[in-house]
Amino acid sequence: MKKLAVLLLLASLIMSGWSGFVLAERVDRSAAPWKSSDNLQNLSLAAAGGDGSLAVVSDSKQKIKRLGADGTLLGQMTYSPAERGARVDFNEAVADEDGRIYALVTVLDSYGLYVQSERIVRYDRSGKAGHVLYERKGDGTSKRIGHIEGLQLSGGALFFYEADADKLQLKRIVLPENAPETVFAFTLPKDRYLSEITGTEPGQIYYTTRRGSIYQVSPEGVSTKLYPSTTRASDAKNFPELVMLRTDGSLMFVDRLVNAVTTFDPLAPAGTETVLDDAALQRIAPGLDSYEIMDIKQTPTGFAIVLNDRILLMSADFAPAGQISKVGFDGKTLWDRRLLWAVFWLGLLLLVFSVRFFHIHVLERRSSLFLKQVLATVPAILIAMILLSNFIYNSFSARMETQMQRELALLARNGQNLIDGDRLARLHSPSDYRNEDYMAIRAKMNFLFEGEDSEQRQGLYSTLYKYEGDQIYIVMDDDDGVNMFKPFEKNEVNSDVLSQGVVRTGQWEDADGKWLYAIGPVYDSAGQIVGVYETGRDLSVLHRENRKIYYNIIENILMITGGLVVLVMIATFVLLSPIRKLRRSVMAMANGDWDTEVKLRNRDEVGDLGEQFNRMARYIRQHIADITSFSEASYRFVPQQFFNSLGKKGILDIRLGDQIQKNMAVMVANLREFRQLSKTLSPKENFDFMNSFLRRFGPIVRQEDGLISKYLGAGFMALFPGYAEEAIRAAVAIRRELLVYNQHRRSSGYATVDIGIAIHKGPLMLGIIGEERRWEGNVISDDVQRTTMLEQISEIVGCCIVVTRDYYEQLRSPERFMHRSLGRIRLESSDEAMELIDVFEGDPEQQRAAKERTKVLFERGLALCQAGRFYDARETFVEVIKQNRMDRAAKLYFYLCDEYYQKGAGAGWNGTLAV
């Protein structure tokens, strides 16, 4: 379960962390799962595909979205350059008949200002597999727009222009992939500065200049002015942009001054026609914030007009044919998004469950305190550090942005002193591009950044606006793609600058990006406000810079966190070391090592705990010693075998009435003639003698797994719950030890002693008897009494060890012991006769040899007696007595046979000897 809990926790962390990261980083996937469409925003240009699709550059030139005719998202393209931290803009795009996209990717520096490289990239229909077809490195001077212009598809080839100063080269890449080749080149006329260019066939190549003119290039490379006509006033502010050669051979462009689509025939350039004006746009899409035409493209069915947040579809005669303001997600995109959200929420639910599961199966179960401490501390440290890093970043980012606004405000205020307002007032139309006044103003504007490279400039840009006739026009900009006298909308911020002469700061977002700016007034010599000076930075670049700082903060925080975690783990390990020592000591004591002690140097609660543990250990050792002494003492009164026979572990488990019935061998051993001996001894000598006697012979019983049930004054009664041989082996061992004991007594001047032993086996009751205050282990059985009586007659029949036939037959190898039958003998207090056996294995050697020598004669006489042949039996026993005068059993039988021979046996004689 522990492994499963850890695996679940890790899986939930990975699921929720990965999905949360993707949702945070991929804005297109972070929308609500039920949302099936998204608004178009910050559009800049479009490209019509032959398959009816429409590619549109959106999100401030950061993405290309390939849309179906109904606005469904068919694919999405982004570009991630190898240059770390660089900004990428899609500045042009065209689509072929199969829906493949060819895009002009401009890689800017990390501050989003200077062009680092220009790349022509091909994408497949889904927007994947971006492949670079051509690349031109930047020269370090171009700002936001490079030298590649006029990306076009024609006849299975991709055409584009490269502009170097006043020389233009038309290059062609034969598709699908070939090296570019130059197919045409020409030179611009003097003082003509390229703005846009279109066309792929010499004679049908048209370009616009920065001074607001349209030129046609002949096959010989000669430029002819087509627009404006020579009759037009030189101060006209009309400026043609987005020039396009239509399929019918006419030219179409956007008149930026009036935001209208204009056409004319190159063969009759004087006759221009407005086909779509600003008023018409407002009727088609009322209520928009901006109606600036960002791009216009011809489609197979008409035209597509690109505004900031939508695409207007027009017929061939510019009748409204629909509009696309939302991009609808296809089923796969919706499925991916919903699956991602499902994984995120499932990961969170699994995280909650796994935390609970982990808590139950790891933390609440036996596990290392160090592990618990780490699991409790490390996440808290990580969360705290993450919150701290976000707090630091947010605080730093806000302060950075505020500081940047202050610096920009200072630059904007200085700009009004740098710009010559009189010269600005003399600029009236695009035809003034690069004239004396223009260049003087440009030189002043560049003075702020003179000598600064891209790294030092840090993306700062400047823009100059002219205020004329209650209208604001862009005159100069650090974006090479912005033309002169492009109208700029008045708003609350620049109105304050124009009316109050104050400096204002702010942010805005348009089709070119997100900007942090500051604007200030420009005065002429008469003190009138004639323009607005703006300076700022690309906000996305600032955010990227802040993101670098954020990553740097995260990196440092992670390093600090790692060090802190290691420090906490080490400190935790060290602080828990005394607890581990204490635990080892407790475990050792639990495993029976009562002598263990813990050595702690702490002077805190753990040290107190260790001191009390040692004190407790001493108490436990003393208590165990007392219990052990008590137990050992109890074993002296009640043998351990007695408890085992009752199925108890010790005296504490005994209860009054505990009992068991079992077949056991009973042995009674007694000192013979002890009464006479005790009369010669003092009471102390009597006790000393008995203790020394029992100390000598008691262990022999225990060696054979017997237990001494009780002491009989001059002897003891022992029980043998095991094999029958154990009792007789103990008896023989006692008799042999007696020989050594008597030899020692003789050498010490003491009288020798003799021991009589009787053994019988039968069922008996072993149990606890007594009353509430006094218990005693006891044995209740007739066989116990019978064995006691047998011991009493053992001396009469001249036996050291006498056993019953019932017992002897239970021996597994009775022949191992020297023995002879004593016949059936009836005790005085019993009506039942028992066959007894004299085991003389333990007799002194002389008696043992005599009994062994006369065994056959003795047992023959015994058989004759039992058969009633008393004369023959008497003679036989006489022969036995002649050979062994100490054989008391033979003498008993001799007197019995002699009496019966002379007087005759009584009625009911059955061959039994009465003793």
Image (tube, rainbow, N blue to C red):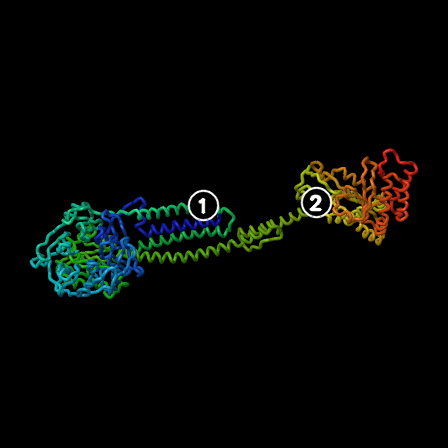
Residue 152 visible in the snapshot: no
Q: Where is residue 226 in the image (x, y as percent from the top left)?
A: 10, 59
In the rendered image, the residue lying farthest to the top is 907
Q: Earlier in the sequence, mark 2 or mark 1?
A: 1
Q: Residue 641 carries which label?
A: 2
Looking at the image, which is closer to me, 710 or 569? Answer: 710
Left or right of 707 in this view: 464: left
Residue 723 lies, in percent from the top left, at 72, 45
Q: Name the residue under label 1.
A: 356
Which type of secondary structure does the marked residue at label 1 adopt? Answer: helix
- Answer with the quarter of the image where residue 182 lies: bottom left
Residue 604 horizontal/vertical position (percent): 53, 52
Give coordinates of residue 193: x percent, y percent.
16, 62
Quadrant of residue 478 within the rendered picture? bottom left
Mark 2 is on which residue type?
Gln
**Observer-nearest of 630 and 910:** 910
